[in-house]
Every structure is written in structure tokens, then in C-alpha cells.
């Protein structure tokens, strides 16, 4: 895996969380109990749902960006496959938030995803610091 899957899965995940945003709009503006939903703006399921939407799109974008950079610089970077996998595993964070909201599952996926994404971003940053620029 050299980044291509990060780009593809990143776009697919972004599409899913964008569509999920339409559900949030429905709940806010058109659902029969929209007043209760609006009144719980900063607490409970409403807050968690918004958190999943935002982090889902952010982590999807990060996968697209990381995938592109891994493809573009794969010959100059080390541990490309590991960084790629960590970024993909990072998508478990927003999925974990949704699983908490809708299924009442514990936050294990959130923690695994957050740690994996943070590790991939830091590892890629360190890898770029180690690249030697050869003047042309």
C-alpha cells in the first residue's frame, strides 16, 4: 500500500460523512422533534453526531493528503506502508463516535483511531524532516 488506497478510501469516507451531514440538517430543520434536537446542541447525541461529522471529514481529507504525499514522495520516504495503514486505521475514530451514538458501544474505536491518525501524521512529519534536498 503506497497511498492510493488512502486517496480512494479518503474520498469514499468524505462522501459518506458529507451525506451524513444531510441527516444532521434533516434532524435540525425538518424532523418532527427538531426543537428537542436544536435544544441539545452542545450535549449528548447531538454534540457527538456533529463531532463524528466533523472528524469524519477531517480524517478523510487527511487520508487524501497523506495518500497523495506518500505517492509523490514514496521513493524518498521510509515506512510508507506503515504510515498509510496508520492513517487508514485513523478512520476508526469518527466511525467509533458513530458507533457510540447509535449503538452505545464503548469508545475503544475512538481511542484506537485517534492514536493511529496522530501517529501517522507525526511519523510523516518526521519522515519529511529527514528528506535530504539536493539542489538542482
Image (cartoon, rainbow, N blue to C red):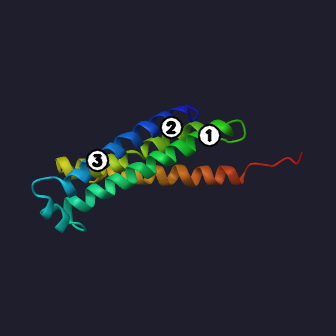
| Helix, strand or loop for disc 1 | helix
Q: Position of residue 115 (x, y in %)?
A: 43, 53
Marks 3 and 2 sit apart, C-alpha to C-alpha, by: 24 Å
Q: Dot 1: few (<14), some (14–19), or many (≥20) neighbours within 10 Å?
A: many
Q: Position of residue 14 (x, y in %)?
A: 41, 43
Which residue is painted at 64% across and 54% down in the image?
126
| Helix, strand or loop for disc 2 | helix
Q: Residue furthest right?
A: 136
**Circles 3 and 2: CB atoms closer than 8 Å:** no
Is residue 79 at least partly visible in the picture?
no
The quarter of the rendered structure image containing the C terminus is: top right
| Mark nearer the viewer, 3 or 2 | 3
Residue 36, compared with residue 2, is above or below; it is below
Q: Which residue is mark 2?
A: 6
Q: Which residue is mark 3?
A: 22
Q: Position of residue 27 (x, y in %)?
A: 19, 53
Which label was assigned to residue 109?
Answer: none
Nearest to N terminus: mark 3 or mark 2: 2
Which residue is painted at 45% across and 41% down in the image?
88
Q: Which residue is mark 1?
A: 70
**Circles 2 and 1: CB atoms closer than 8 Å:** yes
Amino acid at each position: 500500500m503506497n497511498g492510493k488506497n488512502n486517496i480512494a478510501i479518503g474520498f469514499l469516507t468524505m462522501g459518506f460523512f458529507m451525506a451524513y451531514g444531510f441527516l444532521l440538517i434533516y434532524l435540525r430543520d425538518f424532523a418532527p422533534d427538531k426543537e428537542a434536537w436544536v435544544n441539545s446542541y452542545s450535549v449528548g447525541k447531538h454534540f457527538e453526531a456533529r463531532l463524528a461529522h466533523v472528524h469524519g471529514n477531517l480524517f478523510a481529507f487527511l487520508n487524501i493528503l497523506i495518500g497523495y504525499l506518500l505517492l509523490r514522495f514514496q521513493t524518498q520516504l521510509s515506512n510508507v506502508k506503515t504510515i498509510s495503514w496508520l492513517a487508514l486505521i485513523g478512520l476508526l475514530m469518527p466511525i467509533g463516535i458513530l458507533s457510540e451514538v447509535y449503538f452505545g458501544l464503548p469508545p475503544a474505536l475512538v481511542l484506537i483511531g485517534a492514536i493511529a491518525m496522530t501517529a501517522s501524521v507525526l511519523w510523516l512529519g518526521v519522515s519529511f524532516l529527514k528528506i535530504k534536498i539536493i539542489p538542482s
